[in-house]
Structures are given as structure tokens and as C-alpha cells.
Amino acid sequence: MIQASTIIDAWARAAQFLSRIQRSIPKGAGLDITGFGLDDFNRWGLVALVLVNCKEYCSKWLVLATNQFIPNHCHPKKKETISCEEGVLEIILYGTDDGSGEFDQRQLTADVEVNNRAISVDCSLPDGSTMLLPAGTSITLPPGVWHEFGAIGGNALAVEVSTSNNDKDDNTFQNKEIGRFATTIEQDVPGVVVTIDDEGFVYFPTAANAA
Ligand SMILES: [Fe+2]
């Protein structure tokens, strides 16, 4: 469950931030706004703009408010590069999944690339390995690396480039209560209906959806 007002407010704040850093809203991008079913959007939430997602590749913008994080997850198939364009990202790596999708059975190392240089990271528990990615830096995660990330010290814009994105089958969350998309939207804004399609894109009257 997520409130329509939460989605609308989140987009308004994201659009304002993008305007402030002089980024034009990409025309035709899909709006993916989710609270991961956790009912605490300011802590666990995301505004994403999906520029393209085809069978070969995917590109998204991820807009994160201060202290807003994407909860710990891994992708069994997807390889992704996350580049910080604005602000500072904090990313926590928790090792590599052994293929079971069960967080307790992970291997506590992760082979990643930071700024295109390969490194092996010790992700010992309980804290995992925390890295800061200021603007101009990037991390590349092969399939299976458990990761949680968000913005600290201000809003952030990340660009994600990856192999094809399949949110239904290729997102494994540590917290099994999490859903990648909202399943129900509480229509709490009089006169406005917010809808969500099978791909998780949200629609409501906004210039972004009219593009
Ligand atoms: Fe991810």
C-alpha cells in the first residue's frame, strides 16, 4: 500500500531537484516510484525514470532524497553500473549470493569494479562493506552481489546502466516482506487518480507522463 499523495509529492520533489541541477526530464521515460511496500517512503523509497529497457540493455535515472535508501537486494541475472551524477551515494555490500537467494547462505566477498577498476571487497558481517560514491564515481556490480544504497548529506542522482531489467524475476530482497512495486494505491488525493501498470510504472496527471 502506498498513498497517492506520497507518489505525487515524491515526484514533485524529484522534479524540483532535477530542475535545480539543470537536468531536463527525459521525454517518454517511465515513472517508477515505489516504497517497496514498507510504508516508510522517506527511509525506504525510490523515484526512478526508466529511459530505456530492452532485451539487450537498460538505462535509468535514480533520484534519492537525503537518507532515502533502496533496501538490500541482489539480481541473479542483471549486471549493473551505478554512477553518481549529483550528491553522494552510500552503498553497502553484503557479499555474493550463492544462487539460493537466501541471504543467510551468502559468500562474504564481492568482486566489483569501482571507477572501472576491479577490486575484491571483504563484506564481513554484521556491517558488510560501506563505500561512499561522490559525484563522478561509479560501481559495477556483477549478478548476485547483495547491495543496499541511498543518498546521504543531500539529494542524489544516480544513473544506472545495466543488462536488461526484469523487476519481477530478477530482484531478490533480503527482507521477504518487500515488494518491488506498490500493489495497491490509496487514492487519498481528491480529484486525482494514480494508477500503476504491470511493469510498475505509475501514471497521474503530470508533465512527465504527458511527454
Ligand atoms: Fe540493484
Image: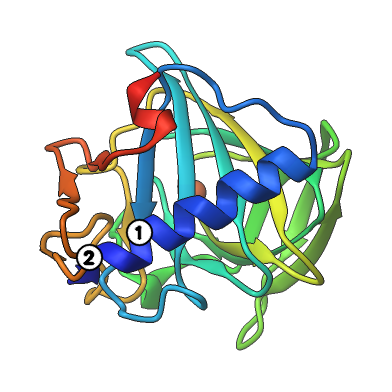
Report if residue 75 is visible in the image.
yes
Classify the position of the N terminus by image quarter: bottom left
- In the image, 101: left or right of 196? right
Total numbered labels: 2
Q: Residue at x 17, y 45 (%)?
A: 196
Locate residue 26: give its quadrant: top right
Q: Can you tell which quarter of the image residue 186 is in?
A: bottom left
Dot placed on the residue nearer the N-terminal end, 2 or 1: 1
Residue 189, numbered label = 2
- Name the residue beneath numbered marker 1: 7
Residue nearest the observer in this picture, 201 or 18: 18
* Image coordinates for residue 56, horizontal then vertical, percent: 41, 11
Percent coordinates x, y for residue 31 in the rendering: 37, 38
Residue 162: image location, x then y, percent: 52, 27
Element marked by disc 1: helix
Amino acid under disc 2: Val
SS at mark 2?
loop
Q: In this view, does 172 lie above or below 81?
A: below
Name which residue type carries label 1: Ile
In this rendering, the answer to whether 143 lies above or below 130 is: above
Residue 134: image x %, image y %?
87, 52
The part of the image, by quadrant, that contains residue 184 is bottom left
Residue at x 27%, y 39% (from the top left corner): 201
Q: Is mark 1 within 8 Å of ligand 1?
A: no
